[in-house]
Image: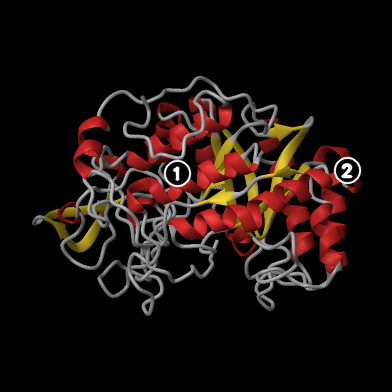
Amino acid sequence: MRDSATRIRINASPVCAALILIFCRGAVYAAGPVDPSTLDNKVLIGYQGWFTCPEDGSQRWTHWSRGAPTPETLTIELFPDVSELDPDERCTVPGMTIGGKPAYLFSSRNQKTVSRHFRWMQEYGLDGVLVQRFVGNIRGKHADGEVVLKNIMAAAKESGRTFAIEYDISGGNAETFAQTLKDDWAYLVDELKVTAHPNYQRHNGKPLLSVWGMGLNDGNAHPPADPQVAKDLIEWFKSKAPAQYRVTYMGGTPARWGTLTADSRQDPAWAGVYASMDIVQPWNVGRYGTLEAVDKWKDDVLVPDVKLAAKNHQIYMPVIFPGFSWSNLKRNARPNQIPRLRGEFLWRQAYNAKMAGAKVLKIAMFDEVDEGTAILKAVSHRKEAPDQGFWLTLDADGAELPSDWYLRLAGDITRMFHGDIKPDAKLPVNPGK
């Protein structure tokens, strides 16, 4: 998902880095199998799964860079920690070194790596993922044999995590996108048997399906402009499709869906579109950039949204994110655009969502290193990233953090939504304990 982040520099009180370093070590919260029959109290994480490299059989670099990686072609920002990867999982980055030694990245086409990601989710107590599926890439996925989705399905079964499909309609053709979604969903149900998978996420007796992007007020980038087309598509998925294709419908909406302002289309009929969704998942990434703005967002947006969703008999699923940076992807952008503040930024959003009354949550994202929102293991220090090019590392905000810090925080956020720990506005000193 692509969206411009609010360009505000954060000034926040420092956290004692020494204490974080001392107390962050120790066992993490390993979770048993997740119940896939209900969305209640769950925290799901977006999973892109879109990285390739020449060693994986694709013969190309995808999403790491524009062509072969160089400081000038890089499109990623956060450098992942690949130290645990086996030799057959490593993609050698040509012309890049770390302390004079070869630099490596990974591929989402590698089953071992995807399984490793899901094993991390299990080890840190995370529920599961919303698998991003871009409408413009569907033909390519069919032609490629659905390698990544099959990897995810196998990994979910091995780890006991849940998963559900989340379509992203960015760049879709207004005339054809709806039929493309219908046809592809039928293909996924009939051919890949996704909804027969024992770990496919369900709710109210139906498979969960998310469609992200309808209603965004950005010209033709997210069809349709006609609210009736959107409503017809939602109704098809909910009740008019053949029984085997019917779903509990989640809509990835504009952040201001409740007021039809700012990033939302403003035709009054869109209120009815949003109200027809079973689950509303507003896209908040980049809508605020400081702790003060996070708190204001709670009062101005989250609280009224929760009330509106309850009035509509809907589930409200806000989206939170750890920070934002895409200066390699967008060369005119400022590095570390929305600082992570050693995890305070992510934690405050989760706490506020819980206190506002949200029962479920989405974290954007697990592996989105392109825009610097990933929570997967990332290197702690600049010296652990390639010597060449600009990289965002976990010491960017002046703290000594382990590579798994954000997985630990996500685990505690999940436990908070499960009701296993009490909500607390303070950042945990030793998450996962």
Q: Residue at x 48, y 36 (%)?
A: 413
Q: Tell me if 259 is positioned left or right of 21 in this view.
A: right
Q: Tell me if 254 is positioned left or right of 2 in this view.
A: right
Considering depth in this image, is 25 or 166 the residue closer to the camera?
25
Relative vertical location of residue 261 with respect to residue 46 in this rendering, above or below: below
Q: Position of residue 57 (x, y in %)?
A: 40, 52
Q: Position of residue 194 (x, y in %)?
A: 66, 37
10 Å neighbourhood of mark 2: few (<14), some, or many (≥20)?
A: few
Q: How many marks?
A: 2
Q: Residue at x 33, y 40 (%)?
A: 405
> Where is mark 2, residue-wise?
242
Q: Residue at x 18, y 62 (%)?
A: 96
Q: Position of residue 163 (x, y in %)?
A: 59, 37
> Where is mark 1, residue-wise?
347
**The residue under label 2 is which amino acid type?**
Pro
**The residue under label 1 is which amino acid type?**
Trp
Relative vertical location of residue 340 with respect to residue 26 in this rendering, above or below: below
Q: Position of residue 162 (x, y in %)?
A: 58, 32
Q: Earlier in the sequence, mark 2 or mark 1?
A: 2
Q: Residue at x 36, y 32 (%)?
A: 431
Relative vertical location of residue 98 with respect to residue 16 in this rendering, above or below: below
